[in-house]
Image (cartoon, coloured by chain):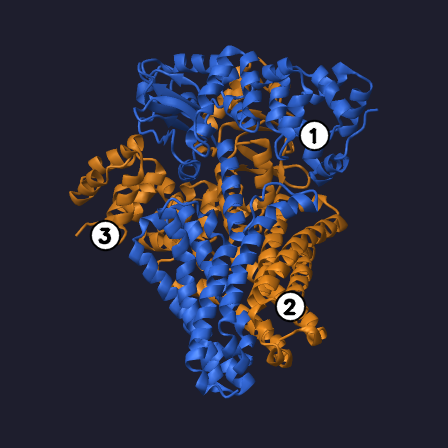
Chain colours: A blue, B orange
Amino acid sequence: MLVLGADRKGAGDLADNNDALSKKNFNTELLLQALRREDIDGFREEFLELHPYDQASFFSALDEEARMKVYHFISPEEMAGLFENLGGEEDEYQDVLSEMSPDYAADMLSNMYADDAVDVLNELDKDQVASYLTIMDKEAANEIKDLLHYEEYTAGSIMTTEYIAISANQTIRSAMHILKKEAPRAETIYYVYVIDEEKKLVGVISLRDLIVNDDDNMVSKVMYDRVVAAMAGEDQEEVARKMRDYNFLALPVIDFQGHLLGIITVDDIIDVMDEEASDDYSKLAGIADLDGMDRNPFSAAKKRLPWLVILLFLGMFTASLIGRFEETLNKVAILAVFIPLIAGMAGNTGTQALAVAVRGIATGDLEKESKWNIILREAGTGFITGLTCGILVTFVVYFWQGDLFLGALVGISIFCTLIVATLAGSLVPLFMHKMKIDPAVASGPFITTINDIISILIYFGIATAFMGYLTK
Amino acid sequence: MLVLGADRKGAGDLADNNDALSKKNFNTELLLQALRREDIDGFREEFLELHPYDQASFFSALDEEARMKVYHFISPEEMAGLFENLGGEEDEYQDVLSEMSPDYAADMLSNMYADDAVDVLNELDKDQVASYLTIMDKEAANEIKDLLHYEEYTAGSIMTTEYIAISANQTIRSAMHILKKEAPRAETIYYVYVIDEEKKLVGVISLRDLIVNDDDNMVSKVMYDRVVAAMAGEDQEEVARKMRDYNFLALPVIDFQGHLLGIITVDDIIDVMDEEASDDYSKLAGIADLDGMDRNPFSAAKKRLPWLVILLFLGMFTASLIGRFEETLNKVAILAVFIPLIAGMAGNTGTQALAVAVRGIATGDLEKESKWNIILREAGTGFITGLTCGILVTFVVYFWQGDLFLGALVGISIFCTLIVATLAGSLVPLFMHKMKIDPAVASGPFITTINDIISILIYFGIATAFMGYLTK
């Protein structure tokens, strides 16, 4: 039987959510009927008209039996575009590949843009990768092998080799001729890169310039020779920043000698930005990985538990610290009332400072500043917020408990805590960044717990020292 | 005297950070000397070669005297590209505009792409906008006025009207002719939109297709007629999602009748993504606005204090709740020791759940799910994490304090707290989203504080009920 699988709702929703115009894109029923009737021509006619993203949405919602028919109806080459647009779910590549015959899969992988094929292969285990590379088209396999060498999160790992390169000593007419010939296999034709005999990058020319300028002009006259490029080992976040600042649609990637190795297109950069934003965000929240919605509580709990257990033990440490002040607490139980307030304020101000620091590291703004500048500014910020909140709390506690000394004790604790917590929130991630330790360690909950400890030491330290003055 | 202003370091760093190839881009000294010597031709020759982003970086680092010379050396039209690339600092547009003569400024604004001019005008006050629009080029002023009507954060507010539109009944040759003619004023020439006599959008054709296909083909044959478009009132985040999914370089914007109103280019979408990511991030951290690094502690404190003061009062409320259990605390002071642990765990798990929910709302994943599904999943996740942490903590406290009942009390409190806090973390933002309340209210610190309160009620509630069993 041919029906939409477990995800039937998904595809339906998609159609509902779309606006008037794009609703036309996607006639699920028509396609399903064609599949059911084994009407190859009807299916192909409708299906190949779809944007690959829509093809992938439709395909993802099918059950295995229906998917097997699709492999039959659609050539590996036609499947390549669809397959690039799968992803999302963790093991989707793996599952779909295992349904295809190895030859079909290898053929499809050869027909994908090299960078997309690399993305897929990076999700598979080494044996699988090796076996696909063996049966794949030689040329494609070699391109992919080269790209697989680059370290993750570098420019090299997200670039593709399907660019158009020309030499400077030719007319625009002849450049356009090359461009038309190469267009079908190039990932973008909107930038053409100019290289010398040694394959060194010497210039770039946009299709816009090619079209606007006279056909008899020389490329060397029209090309832009101050090319902004990325080094192959450069961090992908840095590449994204360049792309954003310069509004490029593609960026060339070079080695130390200036040889052109590949290009990175703007759609890949959008994916990088998504990834990096979600990464910073998960760090702040203390979750291992935010990608994709979890379908069941077990996988959700698996992602959240590691941090929670670490924080539990840090929390036990905090508890043991308070335990040392049990005598103070026994005498003045009212002190306990303000523990969550003080620890909470320390946590909040620390998270704020952390967020600013992580963001500053991400945008590169912080690296331009001197260390002392940052420390002074954060200490100043802590001083101002601490003074404001400290004075406020002193009066509130005074009016509530009628005890000015208690008010002052809480107020001074808040004041000191906010200064130290603000500094900790910004300096810990900066220090980790400088030490090249993965700043994921300095996540929100971690900083919060550190600041809990600091705030409690300050509060009980002050309280124990001046206990004699407390009226209760 | 003509020197680099306070930001001298900035520009220098920029040059240092760049890699070998792009270092060539930027000869600060050469440009400064030309400015100093009042060598108009020398300055223009070097300066106009630069990418507008580099021009803006150089310009931002100048002092006022030097900037005044630049206005003199560079025409308003040439200034337009530079000006679009300023931004970043809050009042930079304002400052620079006030240095220019009104005519120069108006002329420059007319020469910017309409969407960029709108971005600038949105930063100014209404009187200023009106006065610039009066002296501006009529046609440009009208385009801008139309765009200013759209609500912020909608597709309409970020679109531009400088697109190329053609009719379907012509050959590719004639379409290419129009394209070449319109290229200088169009923001992108890589997509050409096909409209009917009523200006309704009927198709799209990429420059790639125009070039690859035979010149004698009809546009109607080659064009793609299942256009994905955005509605003018659509949220910019939704537009960004479409652009990312479909890998487009531009997206047309239409009204309810399907008339083509404008286009949104991928570089604007990158800015939107940056903005939205930073927005979600600031919410989680409880900071008003994370854009740009603050130079001094006062502006930093101004952004952080509002939340801190709100949280201070919420914290006082928490304190007053504990105050009600003072009697319990007086009898069993050891209870106080575990307050930060329990409140901290509630805060952490709530922040995790919040992050997942906010992200799910942003990606649209959550809207596909049923309410009950979400509640069940989150309750299940809380149950699993609560059970694990609860059992762990029971044993740790038992071994540490030698008191199994105390251990069980803390363990059961953690168990209940984690379930409730996980639910609160995910349901509060979902509820706000459904109620169309700005989910900024459900920021990280807010959820943390709510969960502090819940956790303390649970803990002291259980403790007070079973106090008789506590050995100390």
Examine the rendered structure and indicate whether residue A42 appears above or below residue B97.
above
Q: Please indicate, yes or no, whether residue A162 appears anywhere in the rendered image.
A: no
In the image, residue A344 lies at what x, y percent? 52, 66
Q: Which one is closest to the eye, mark 1 or mark 2?
A: 2
- Residue labelled with disc 3: B65
Disc ID at residue A150: none
Question: Residue B126 in the image: x percent, y percent?
Answer: 47, 58
Asked if A317 appears above or below A393 in the picture, the reply is above
Measured along the vertical axis of the image, is residue A382 above or below residue A177? Answer: below
Residue pictured at 57% horizontal, 19% vertical: A109
Residue wearing tag 2: B406
Picture mark count:
3
Residue A256 relative to residue A114: left or right: left
Chain of the residue on which disc 2 is drawn: B
- Subunit under mark 1: A
In the rendered structure, find residue A60 and report the number of the disc placed on it. Answer: 1
Contact check, label 1 and label 3, Cβ < 8 Å: no
Q: In front here: A234 or B67?
A: A234
- Subunit bearing disc 3: B
Note whether residue A364 is visible. Answer: yes
Spatial CA span between label 3 and label 2 = 73 Å
Asked if residue B398 is positioned above or below residue A26 in the image, the reply reads below
Query: Disc 2 residue type?
Result: Leu
Q: CA distance from mark 1 to mark 3?
A: 62 Å
Tell me where residue A465 appears, x and y as whole percent: 41, 79
**Disc 3 packing (10 Å; few <14; some 14–19; many ≥20):** few
Nearest the camera: A401 or A164? A401
Q: Residue at x 49, y 20 (%)?
A: A144
Q: Is residue B224 left or right of residue A23?
A: left
Which element type, helix, strand or loop, lies under badge 2?
helix
